[in-house]
Image (cartoon, rainbow, N blue to C red):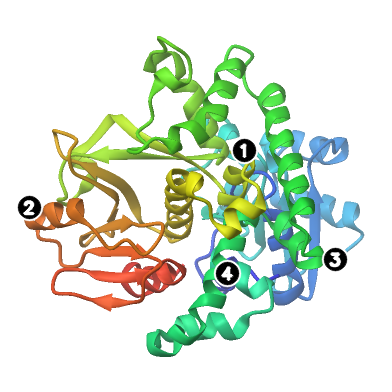
Amino acid sequence: MYRYAIEKLKEWKADSDRKPLIIEGARQVGKTWVMKEFGNIAYEKTVYINFDSNSRMAELFSSDLDVERIIMGLELYSDMKIEPDNTLIIFDEIQEVPRALSSLKYFYENAPQYHIICAGSLLGIALHQGTSFPVGKVDFLKLYPLSFREFLLAAGKEKYVALIESEDYEMLKAFKQDINDYLKQYYFVGGMPEAVNTFIAKKDFNSVRNVHQRILEAYEQDFSKHAPNEYVPKIRMIWNSIPSQLAKENKKFIYGLVREGARAREYESAIMWLTDCGLVHKINRVSAGRLPLKAYEDMKAFKMYMLDVGLLACMSGLSAKILLDGNDLFTEFKGALTEQYVLQQLITHRNLKIYYYTNESGGSEVDFLVDTGEEVVPVEVKAEINLRAKSLRVYSEKFSPKIAIRTSMADYKEEAWLVNVPLWAIDNLCKRKFGDK
């Protein structure tokens, strides 16, 4: 398996001004594997410390946070000499020992020669609980489920990836059916590493679905284990409502679908908890396509997506046959899966702020607006080859974007006012227009 995050970690290592690095991401997106793989690739030695139920490490960090004392303790614990230039220090499940988080400040200020990367499940929540955390003394890297391109690489389809990256769309026409088939598989399998590995090894969709169900069960257990007791029922209701929310035509989040008569103030904390965990992506509405989009944000209107398209398909109960073969009864939810897929590809890119747009009457909607910091790019998502884009045209006539994107199953095509990009090539747009991952 190959993750593009490895390239970002190599850049971090080469930076003379590097800070301790924290990898953020939902449980089971592959943080531990990425850290260890990076250690194997880029360093002579790796000292791996897991803080979960580790009383010895809790004791080591409970005293003063003198860096040399900590290094000596890590060497004794790992039975390995830590040499700054060729040793990677990994702190996993670091949220279990808050003083280890605090120690990163002293590593940065007093011993920047040490290379330290950290990760932890529910770390986003830990950072909101008042942990002594040195702002400006650490760097962050977000890790998400595998993108479609990483899925193709895992499947051994490096040549397809190279062809897509070449943007030779005439050549791609000859192979688009094969690539479309892999895209449908990705809709079912998604990008959770265990699900992808199971699919590659067994080519069995039932086994993949079993993996999805285990992951979802683990998340449900996290609700009870880590969330405040008064939040747990509301978190479950929000979480379980997501498929029905996305099945609606406009996909705007409606509290009434969670519970009849529900109000925003009752569920705001539950939504924040899910967002901090990395389990959901909350995409807010904006009322205008002008920079900065944040200035036009409507905090009361938003869409909510899951972290992974395969988990969404599992929660929705979609069978592999319906998803892969197509079914007229499946038409509406196919749009939800496609939007989930596109968001999943967009959100893996750094420094992008993503919203959606509707006009005041609600009669015109653009699925995603991307704020690159320099321009606003509207992105309309189509599940099939339907190229009608009335809302996108209305938006473009009003706000005159430099480029408008429609992504669908149709071939690449440049028109006077927009570019049609195949769904499986949306990453090309991201790399060229929005900057590399």
State the separation of the CA atoms marked 2 and 1: 38 Å
Under mark 4, the amino acid is Asp
User: Circle 1 is placed at which residue position?
Assistant: 315
Residue 209 image offset from top left, x and y in percent:
73, 48
Q: Earlier in the sequence, mark 4 or mark 2?
A: 4
Which mark is in front, 3 or 4?
A: 4
Q: Earlier in the sequence, mark 3 or mark 2?
A: 3
Quadrant holding the N terminus: bottom right
State the separation of the CA atoms marked 1 and 4: 22 Å
Please give the name of the residue rendered at 57% of the width and 47% of the height, measured from the top-left corner: 105
Q: Earlier in the sequence, mark 2 or mark 1?
A: 1
User: Circle 2 is placed at which residue position?
Assistant: 398
State the separation of the CA atoms marked 3 and 1: 47 Å
User: Circle 3 is placed at which residue position?
Assistant: 81
Which mark is in front, 2 or 1?
A: 1
Which one is in front, 48 or 357?
A: 357
